[in-house]
């Protein structure tokens, strides 16, 4: 089945000239970044020409230069200022500050040298989010479906928060999991366990939607009912609980990575051909290129200045390759 999917993909990829194809070149040296052993990376962001990493199980956030020199780290397990009771999760920057979500109800705020400043409660539970991004003066918060809102925007200057409702259907458990990616004045929504991509403009009005051809609509997995709906659940949350949970039989899409303002990279999972396989797709849903990653058992973390950053699953170390067209 996996081989058949890959053969069909090869037939559907748009014709492009060889000098437009992305290719892997030499491995890129990463100095301290390659030698640092992480416990569980939740987020990897390149912000203002520096690499920031949240290590959930290590209870630390890190700052590296683009060539991998360790510039600073912050955090430890605990309940004091700048400490993490469970660990840091998603991170993003705005107006000179770094915002980090935690498993507690608040975000922790740092300067760009990772000096702790304060914590702030922006939404009810900062632990219930799938992503954190930046747009002008706003943080873009991607909540789980236990919020009826599909997006929150938080203005870091005025401290005003707006709720965006996109009327996504309620899905069992992880089938609802998505994140968003910014392309100039557009936002791409991509689902981790569904073959589903939706494009919205800067005001979160829908532009179009598409699927990758010859990929199932959703991952295979086990469905389970919630035994009891909590008494404190509101009417909307009760509907979410009623849908039950979903446990996928392996990864479906492993990662999504923006390459430029028109194209992004989709890394497959075990249910869609194996995580060494990937395709480049444009914002109209056209398949531009099929490719094989240079290392097996890796997760793509990010892309910047023709360098593709990946984490090895077994060693948890980070490697990188030149990747350009």
Image (cartoon, rainbow, N blue to C red):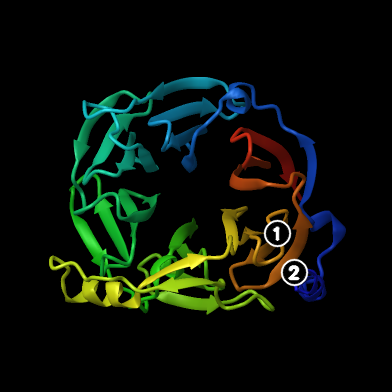
Asked if residue 121 lies left or right of residue 139, the reply is left
Q: Is residue 48 visible?
A: no
- Between 264 and 279, the one lying in front of the other is 279
Tag 1's secondary structure? loop
- Between 77 and 217, the one lying in front of the other is 77
User: Residue 303 at what x, y percent from top left?
Assistant: 61, 45
Q: In which quarter of the image is the N terminus?
A: bottom right
Q: Which mark is residue 274?
A: 1
Q: Which mark is residue 53?
A: none
Q: Which residue shows up at 21% across the image and 31% down it?
A: 118
Please tell me in which quadrant of the rendered image residue 98 appears. top left
Asked if residue 288 lies left or right of residue 38, the reply is right
User: Residue 197 at what x, y percent from top left?
Assistant: 52, 71
Total count of labels: 2
User: Residue 128 at what x, y percent from top left?
Assistant: 30, 55
Question: From the viewer's perspective, is residue 117 above or below residue 176?
Answer: above
Q: State the residue lying farthest toward the front.
A: 227
Asked if residue 322 lies left or right of residue 64, the reply is right
Q: Which residue shows up at 22% across the image and 71% down it?
A: 229
Circles 2 and 1: CB distance less than 8 Å? yes
Q: Which residue shows up at 77% across the image and 76% down it?
A: 12
Q: Earlier in the sequence, mark 2 or mark 1?
A: 2
Q: Which residue shows up at 37% across the image and 79% down it?
A: 169
Please tell me in which quadrant of the rendered image residue 111 appears. top left
Q: Which mark is residue 2?
A: 2
User: Residue 89 at what x, y percent from top left?
Assistant: 38, 43
């Amino acid at each position: 089945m996996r081989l058949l999917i890959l053969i069909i993909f090869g037939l559907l990829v748009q014709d492009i000239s060889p000098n437009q194809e992305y290719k892997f070149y030499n491995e890129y040296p990463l100095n301290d970044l390659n030698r640092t052993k992480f416990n569980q990376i939740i987020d990897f962001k390149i912000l203002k020409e520096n690499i920031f990493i949240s290590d959930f199980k290590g209870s630390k956030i890190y700052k590296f230069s683009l060539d991998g020199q360790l510039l600073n780290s912050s955090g430890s397990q605990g309940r004091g200022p700048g400490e993490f009771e469970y660990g840091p999760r998603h991170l993003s920057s705005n107006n000179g500050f770094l915002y980090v979500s935690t498993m507690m109800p608040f975000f922790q705020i740092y300067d760009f040298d990772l000096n702790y400043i304060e914590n702030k409660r922006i939404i009810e539970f900062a632990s219930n989010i799938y992503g954190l991004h930046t747009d002008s003066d706003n943080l873009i918060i991607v909540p789980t479906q236990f919020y009826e809102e599909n997006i929150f925007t938080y203005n870091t200057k005025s401290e005003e928060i707006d709720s965006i409702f996109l009327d996504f259907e309620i899905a069992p458990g992880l089938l609802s999991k998505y994140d968003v990616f910014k392309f100039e004045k557009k936002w791409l929504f991509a689902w981790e366990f569904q073959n589903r991509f939706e494009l919205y403009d800067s005001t979160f009005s829908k532009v179009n939607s598409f699927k990758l051809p010859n990929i199932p609509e959703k991952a295979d997995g086990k469905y389970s009912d919630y035994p009891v709906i909590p008494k404190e659940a509101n009417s909307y949350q009760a509907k979410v609980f009623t849908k039950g949970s979903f446990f996928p039989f392996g990864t479906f899409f492993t990662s999504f990575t923006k390459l430029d303002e028109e194209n992004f990279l989709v890394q497959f999972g075990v249910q869609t051909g194996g995580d060494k396989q990937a395709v480049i797709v444009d914002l109209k849903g056209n398949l531009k290129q099929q490719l094989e990653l240079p290392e097996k058992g890796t997760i793509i973390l990010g892309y910047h200045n023709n360098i593709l950053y990946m984490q090895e699953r077994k060693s948890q170390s980070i490697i990188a390759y030149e990747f350009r067209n």
